[in-house]
Amino acid sequence: MFPKATPKASHSPSLILLSNVTAESLALRLRTLHGLDAGTAPGFDTWRAELLNPGSPAWEAGTLCLVLHGPALFPAGVGEDFESVLDGLSTAIEEAKRQHPDRTLIVSTLDLPRAPAQPPAGPNLERRAAQRWRDILESLRVPVLDIEELAAETGRENFYNAKTWYLGALPFSARGETRLAAEVARMGRILQGTRRKCLVLDLDGTLWGGVVGEDGLDGIILSDHGVGAIYRDVQVAAKRLARQGVLLAIASKNNPEDALRPFREHPNAVLHEEDFVCVKANWLPKPQNIADIARELNIGMDSLVFIDDNPVERAAVRAGCPEVEVPEFPSDTAELPAFMREVADRCFTAPRLDAEDAAKAGMYRAEALRTSARASCGSLDDYLASLEMKLDLHSLREDEVPRAAQLCAKTNQFNLTTRRYTEADLLVMLRDKARRVWIASLRDRYGDYGRIALAIAEISGTGDTKSALFDTFLMSCRAMGRGVEGAVLTWIEELLGSEGVTALNGRYVPTAKNEPVRDFWERMGYAENGELWSRKAPFPERRSFVCRNS
């Protein structure tokens, strides 16, 4: 779940907890409840020394998680000098990140209860300090473990235990520690890029109360007050996910006109027809419709989450589409907004969002226009020429590392080696003089595909014996079938040739999902060479309908 550490002669946990309180029992819960290989640094309150010691065994772990108990950081209470305390800690974290760019460091927020007997209109130093620390974490660009939010959700009286704090420097109750362990485990899934891509929604009883085909537009339950506000808030939650790059689709047993009418005409609808990238409103079995949605969007079934109020439909989808996540719908409609939040947190949280995530629905709508254009063209060549594709390829920049890591984590079909590099891994590669890392983006007459391809090559040898091995070559499925992969490879071959590289080698590592690129190297003119595919200079020009944007 967490990034792997560099192999050592003796075993090192993949996750180390650093803390200013006792953390052994939290590590135990991570191991027993979540199956994580978790440990702690030796000694008590050694977290600062371990953080600053570049040779500490703690850094042999792939991930370190710094769990800070606010009152222990300010044992005499939060004073006016809190900024200097926090700035010093920030400097230590920044130095640790610089020393270990290939490791992931998670840092907690600070939960600081307000000091007693404070006048209502007086300064709240605890809140100011907690906010100051949040601002620092944002500037440090580290993954954040939000202890403050967990304590607020659980209730401080349930999250903490005064007796174990005073007897053993363990501030968290069993309930609080269990919740904390679950959040650390969830962060592991997020950092490994296991976010799902598409939320498939039923309509009647899910996005509104009642049955639109029977009750009519005025008879469904959807409003800004009362029970109808529950369904409005469900739509708000779905709309928020769409803004974060989650694709929304509909699978409903309904007449198409009835299904879409509330999105077009209801005054309290938050979602509208254009928010959905795929609509299946018909009387076919829902497993079939869901499979069709995955195929039309060109994403795996394991990228889908299906929400439906009908237990029969949920059971059918679980049986017919076992890779699809089908959460259990709450029996009490008042719990629906909390249910949507839980689904969003568990299935759709991204390590980081960028502009491409927010524009994803538009990208899929543009793909629908391309599909329509393909049907009207007489040949594939005519269609590809009509797209007017323009490709950009350049060396990966630091600000593009999050998107590159996202491509590594999520790309399965067109991925020749399926190596899951993290942001930390890629930052190390950018500093490696033997590595070349390129990212490519594509646009055409219908819109921008965004950054769609990543290639990593390692150069070895000197002079006339200079060669390069492709460590990674991947491309988003939304650019497949257009000849883009050949254009990307041709451009990279030219760049490597200009550096004096005379021999190129590629590798294909088969997985359950990358069968579509099994013959990629052969199609590109490479010859089988044991476990590799190879070719020598001069490197060829390949016919393509893709123009270079340079």
Image (tube, helix red, strand yellow):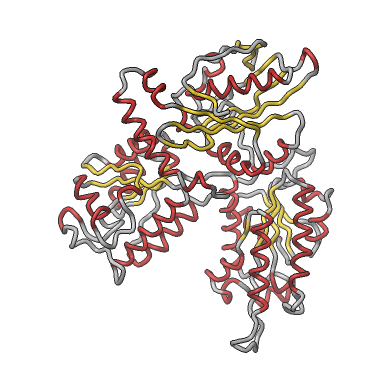
Q: Residue 221: horizontal and vertical position, in percent?
A: 24, 63
Look at the picture and state if 74 lies above or below 38. below
Q: Residue 202: horizontal and vertical position, in percent?
A: 30, 50
Residue at the (63%, 49%) spot, across then down: 36
Left of 57 or right of it: where is 102? left
Residue furthest to the front in view is 550
Q: Residue 393: horizontal and vertical position, in percent?
A: 59, 30
- The quarter in which the N terminus is drawn is top right
Quadrant hosting residue 92: bottom right
Look at the picture and state if 462 lies above or below 388. above
Q: Residue 273: horizontal and vertical position, in percent?
A: 30, 49
Look at the picture and state if 143 lies above or below 256. below
Closest to the observer, 415 or 446: 446
Closest to the observer, 112 or 550: 550
Residue at the (80%, 18%) spot, across then down: 462
- The quarter in which the C terminus is drawn is top right
Q: How many marks?
A: 0
Quadrant hosting residue 12: top right
Residue at the (69%, 71%) spot, across then down: 70
